[in-house]
Amino acid sequence: MIAPFQIASGPRVRFGRGEAAFAGEEARALGMKRPMIFTDTGIASCGVLESLTGGLEKTGLEFHLYDQVEADPSDESMARAHEAYEGSGCDGIIAAGGGSTIDTAKAAGVLAGNGGKIHDYFGFGNVPSHLPPLITVPTTAGTGSEVTCSAIVTDSTQKIKAVMASPLMFARVAVVDPELLSLMPSPIAAGTLMDALTHAIESMTSPKANPWTKALCLQAITNIGRYARRFVENPADPEPASAISLASTLAGHCFTNTGLGIVHSLSHPIGVYHHIHHGTSNAIFLPPVMRFNLQAVRADYAQIAPLLQNPAGPERIDPRDESAPQAAIDSVRSLLRDIGISATLRKSGLTSEEGFEIMAKDAAESPQVLTNPVHATEEDMLSLLRAAMDG
Ligand SMILES: [Fe+2]
């Protein structure tokens, strides 16, 4: 029998190559007359948004470009984005970029709809009023933020990554166009897809997982296992880009329903203190955390092991084998090697264990601990940080 569960479905998703050109039509249908495009300087200047802006021009919408989004956005940078929005006379937001851009747009929208300070809305369900209409257009394949109802905020005072989440923070439409991934540098493609894989594995093994989310997680993991190597080799190749793009959005939909696990608990403080790319830090912590969780989720790991093995390799993992759960961890490690991620903290620039205690404490107090399959204490977090130092 299937136990009762609920699904929050989020925005209408418009998926496919070339679909970014229809963001203007979507904006007009939502009643926007003057949308503000949120993005960062890199995306604004590389030409990847031409189809989107061309579509807006075609619909006759006057738009304003805000390209000052920062990576790992702080409360301060989000407040600046909100000020720019308020001063522009815009009446809706199109967030075109990676997770930092989409999260900044959500936070600016929360402030536009509710006033006050970002800190007022930290936590779950603390946003009382609707945001201006929001369209999300991801230019990376990893965060899934286009379909989630949360944003990650770097709290500049407390030096933590805080979560703000509310059903009112869902975008109205997510336009997922794999063509927008074509100019991604391969190392970014590798890092971001590891974020998507981590979302899928952490969602699949969450105590809140259900048949709906598990089915979609399995599809996301299948796509990543089959296409990750080809995607990193050439992000402009349409077939792998479509598969990885879909995997990322599916995994985002899943984790917004199930929560994440302690890979994210550990990744967030490492991001705050050492500014390691979020996908890369997930890649570093994923194998040791999988080992930590192994005994509690052996059946899930056995199921995903054949999906993650190198499709061009000679071996075929049988999920019924006693060794299959461990093979899932080994497959993640070999995937990391193949896509060029140096999966240790030391290779990412850390030279000592300085600060590990405070990061272990932050990790143990993070909300993702509650949706990890095994309870992790501060001491466990410290051991995992040490294990990740040299892999
Ligand atoms: Fe993530």
Image: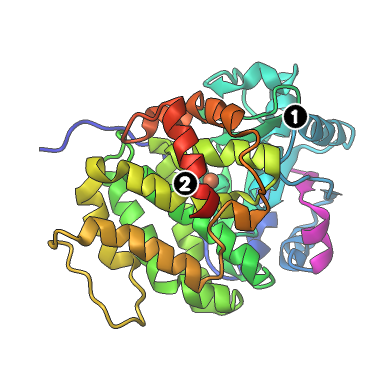
Label 1: which secondary element = helix
Residue 172 in the image, given as x and y percentages of width and height: 57, 42
Q: Tell me residue 335's x, y (percent).
A: 44, 68
Q: Is residue 157 left or right of residue 214?
A: right
Q: Is residue 41 magenta?
A: yes
User: Which residue is at 31% across, 36% downward?
Assistant: 373
Q: Tell me the kind of residue under disc 2.
A: Ala
Check if residue 38 falls in the magenta segment.
Answer: yes
Q: Which residue is mark 2?
A: 387
Residue span colored magenta:
28-46
Residue sitting at x 41%, y 53%: 287
Q: CA distance from mark 2 to mark 1?
A: 31 Å
In the drawing, what numbered circle is on residue 75? 1
- Which badge, 2 or 1, is on the more N-terminal residue? 1
Q: Quadrant of residue 151?
A: top right
Vertical position of residue 160 compared to residue 195: above or below: above
Residue at image position (80%, 67%) is 46
| Residue occupying the point 61% across, 70% down | 179
Point out the residue furthest to the front here.
352
